[in-house]
Amino acid sequence: MSDAIIGGKDRIAKRFAKLKEEDRAGLVTFITAGDPDPEASFEILKQLPEAGADIIELGMPFTDPMADGPAIQEASLRALAAGMHMRKTLSLVRGFRDQDHETPIILMGYYNPIYIYGVAEFLEDARNAGVDGLIVVDLPPEEDAELCVPTVEKGLSFIRLTTPTSDDKRLPKLVQNTSGFVYYVSVAGVTGAGSASNDQIIEAMERLKRHTDLPIAVGFGIKSAEQAAEVARQADAAVVGSAIVSKIAESLDENGKATDKTATMVTGLVRELASGVRNARK
Amino acid sequence: MTSSAPNSFRALPDPDGHFGNFGGRFVAETLMPLILELEQAYKDAKADPAFKKEMDYYLKHYVGRANPLYYAERLSDHLGGAKIYFKREDLNHTGAHKINNCIGQILLAKRMGKTRIIAETGAGQHGVATATVCARFGLPCTVYMGSKDIERQSPNVFRMRLLGAEVKPVVSGSNSLKDAMNEALRDWVTNVEDTFYIIGTAAGPHPYPELVRDFQSVIGNEAREQIMEAEGRLPDQVIAAVGGGSNAIGLFHPFLDDKDVEVVGVEAAGHGIHTGNHAASLSAGKPGVLHGNRTYLLMDDDGQIKEADSISAGLDYPGIGPEHSWLKDIGRARYEPIGDKEALDAFKLCSELEGIIPALECAHSIAQVMKEAPKMGKDKIILMCLSGRGDKDIFTVAEALGVEL
């Protein structure tokens, strides 16, 4: 196994160091693995870095995504209907990693598919496939012994979601055991819903910075290059998910199948978002 | 899996909400502060005599408790074995055990200063009970219900609307109870400031399994006193149907430390476990994590949740309360599957012999009683929870029997 492939928190740290050098925020893009089908999904994934994604979040499909809005729910169901499962998700990462050794990949999803795979086996396979970190929505710090601690011991990042309900009392508990970056969910709600105001984001960033030195990525409700730029002026990275996933849905034919426009429509949006993020501080 | 017997079967959950390996708090971070706040509020309420007094008042004057423990004489004679007693939860206001828990949770919501109530419902019984207490206490109420269930339970949908609740159809996933629960969680995560989520069963993240169990334990506590009065001794067996398992845990819990009382839960086997179309998560599922807790679930090899299937919409859920998973694993309770057809036969038998039309949920437990009682001597006693009345099910039953209403 080549060290260039193996996943780990270093790849994330290097990426944020590079962003700092370039004095700009990063763009984190989310797609669901296997959406709308495994092949089309791999095509999209491969093209994301060139289109301007600095970090990739790859959703692990799940039947019951309780914290997600309609766009990402549907993406999960499309992927599952196309025969996606965890082993295929990991081989998707592996395929990507064979050609890209630098762009961090974070797997994002819910605990049950990992639990059923087996935590130790999952971490081993994920690391060998080139996964650098995990975001697991339904594992708060109260359940750290389940997956967070083993993930950190394996050298991968366990990235925590912090939210508008995370106050000064709660935050110390949230940032312990976390690494890579802190993901700030800027509105209380599901993915793809409303967005936070600039003032709210500034206030939240100040609060977060009191508790962690890690880079802070801000997401939820970012749909346009302008919104991405606004966030990029405050945060270390802007995360876009539902808007990209909706673009995939928009590109499908009447039978819900990928078309020759699917990858280009997605990369087109990512290019716009990236230019917003890259020009934000100029 | 068995482990050595604990000193008491009634001491859990532990402070983190675990029943052995089950339970826990598997929720999105946005909800964690709310769940911790609820846990604290419930602790305070439990320690406050005024809360208990208020609860007792409404249970007596509004719900109509204590309800009777009824000796089902003709059914007992017909089966020719053990004496069968029914705990008559069907005689509660709104016609099922669900209201016990709703009274408890809405009083808690008021204490916490919450001003808006949400709930999920499958058959609509919990939705009706929630809409009822919301009307009584003057709080706005939104009930999430799968579009499939809205179709097959239209009388309950109308009832909820009469009571002033907003019924929101859920058209995601499989359009049934688990999806309604997902949608209620999505609402809660969005409206964190003012909203209280009244969960209808003894499942979900800690402290819900504990507090729902405590609010439903009125069933077992009353039944225990009543059987002592009627027979001068405890029953040999307690039986209840389990969907999420709230009436069952409510009946079982006060008897768990009585080692001579056998505890039997009845799961919905739908078209039969071998067909894959059932709701028997304990008999045919395996431990996994969904809706805030670790428990037995129906799922595939990839950890994707399967749809449940039962003629009884109230048992149509792919999971089970975590305390039942624990009771199964340590061997304190056994869980038996009963299919749609057996439940229908029991539904008819109970109607004809006792003049009680039971809910399809507890028709499953009657079907199990029909198997257990004849094997037991006439000196034995079975105590079964008749969790609800069957008026809501007459359309479903008529359809299954090929009768057009």
Image (tube, helix red, strand yellow):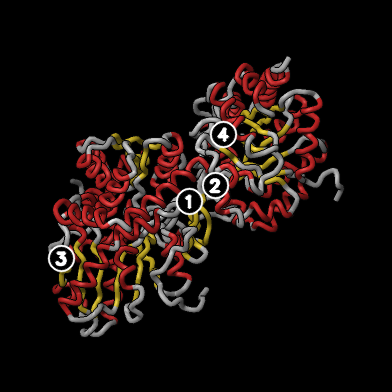
Q: Secondary structure at mark 2?
A: loop
Kind of residue sitting beneath label 4: Val
Instruction: Provide the residue designation for mark 1.
Output: B292
Instruction: Provide the residue designation for mark 3.
Output: B68
| Relative depth, front residue between A204 and B211 | A204
Disc 1 to disc 2, C-alpha distance: 7 Å
Say which chain tag 1 marks: B
Disc 2 to disc 4, C-alpha distance: 14 Å
User: Would you call the spot at circle 3 few (<14 residues within 10 Å), some (14-19), or many (20 or more)?
Assistant: some
Give the image quarter of residue B190. top left
Give the image quarter of residue A179. top right
User: Taking the image as drawn, is residue B177 in sight?
Assistant: yes
Q: Secondary structure at mark 4?
A: strand
Instruction: Provide the residue designation for mark 4.
Output: A185
Q: Nearer the viewer's eye, disc 2 or disc 4? A: 4
Q: Secondary structure at mark 1?
A: strand
The answer to whether residue B372 is left or right of residue A190 is left
Disc 4 to disc 3, C-alpha distance: 52 Å
Give the image quarter of residue B100. bottom left
- Say whether mark 1 and mark 3 are on the same chain: yes
Disc 1 to disc 4, C-alpha distance: 20 Å
| Relative depth, front residue between B327 and A143 | A143
Disc 3 to disc 1, C-alpha distance: 35 Å
Kind of residue sitting beneath label 1: Gly
